[in-house]
Image (cartoon, rainbow, N blue to C red):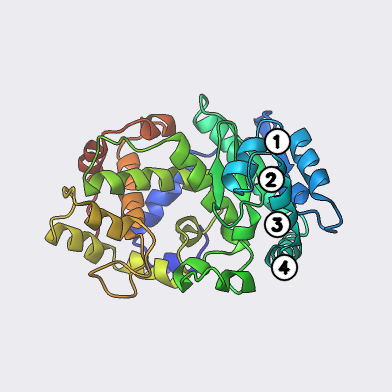
Amino acid sequence: MKNKVILYTSSFLLLLFACTEKRYKVDTSSVNKPIHFAWLYKDILPQDGQVSPEQVLSTIQTRYPTLARGYLEDILQLGHPDTPFTRVNLAGFLADPYIKETRTAIYETFPDTKDPEKEYTEALKRYSVLTPEAVVPSVVFSYNGFNYAVVALDTCMLVGLEMYLGQNFSGYKGLSWPDYISIRRRKELMVPESLTGWLMTEFPKDNKSATFIDDVVYRGKILFYLQQLLPGRAEHELLGYTPEGYAYAVKNEGNIYGFFIQKQLFYSEDKREIIKYTEEAPFSAGMPHETPGRIAWFLGWRIVSSYMDNHKDITIDQLMRNHDYKSIFTQSKYKPKK
């Protein structure tokens, strides 16, 4: 958490984060569990491009026998691998100029995957220690057709490299993504975003919990755990905020909390209100435009951090399996300074 915006935090928060880092420190050198990687993008989009649809199809079915059908049919939407029409679709796919442009950008942006492999390895080893009964996934570097940044399956996650080609990648313009979406299409955010997706799949929210505070605390749990998996990451990167957006949120934390209290939103079950502060948006509705979108994630993280600081006997595993979100909120003793 060496980050210039840390200057805006209170001494209490600095102490809180220092304590949680030390408390959940894992010596990964003693973890012998291997972390497996695969490079599916190289098989669907070979760098030289000089392959036939039949070769691509055969390679994918041979190397990924349990993934091939779902990948081709559901993720890329090219059809069932055993039907002739899929070969026709695949031929069109490989010849598409837009796909060729994307393939070039992927290999330029990711000449190799050594750096993310190292970060995934450290994070997933921590994961195997902090939640010992959880499935530790293989990481499949993939091309997901601009449909999914990460696809979480039973034992692996498919990370779409095409989603992290940089804000200025020309191909994104054709997708008409707003700036607040495209600004996060940076390779530096690939690891935290994909691990967030995996955690949300492995530890889903209890659907019986329908209030705003339930959503706030749930997202806070995800971010708190992510922080323990990636302790060297700047906090704004874990959230997917800009440094400026994060600094503004920290500086105005008390006002943000006060806004929800004043509007009596914490115990609201209005889905429209919940979505305003939990899903993608250029800013948080009703607040100054400098306030980042998805502000519920930020607030939830603060609440859960306070809860864990006040309950030193609670393990990460116990936290993630606790679905009494309201109790976590009330027991957090969270009270930000205005």
Mark 4, residues whose alpha carbon is within 10 Å: few (<14), some, or many (≥20)?
A: few
Q: Earlier in the sequence, mark 3 or mark 2?
A: 2
Spatial CA span between label 2 and label 1: 8 Å
The residue sitting at 30% across, 66% down in the picture is 284
Q: Tell me the element at label 3.
A: helix
Spatial CA span between label 3 and label 2: 10 Å
Between circles 4 and 1, the one closer to the viewer is 1
Where, quadrant-wise, is the C terminus in this rendering?
A: bottom left
- Residue 226 vertical placement versus 104 (above, below): above
Spatial CA span between label 4 and label 1: 26 Å
Dot 4 corresponds to which residue? 97
Amino acid type, mark 4: Pro
Dot 1 corresponds to which residue? 82
Mark 1, residues whose alpha carbon is within 10 Å: few (<14), some, or many (≥20)?
A: few
Marker disc for residue 93:
3
Between circles 3 and 2, the one closer to the viewer is 2
Farthest front residue?
Answer: 84
Farthest top residue?
Answer: 133
Q: Tell me the element at label 1.
A: loop
Judge whether residue 12 can be spotted in this image.
Answer: no
Q: Earlier in the sequence, mark 2 or mark 4?
A: 2
Query: Do tag 2 and tag 4 residues touch (Cβ < 8 Å)?
Result: no
Marker disc for residue 147:
none
Amino acid type, mark 1: Asp
Query: Do tag 2 and tag 1 residues touch (Cβ < 8 Å)?
Result: yes
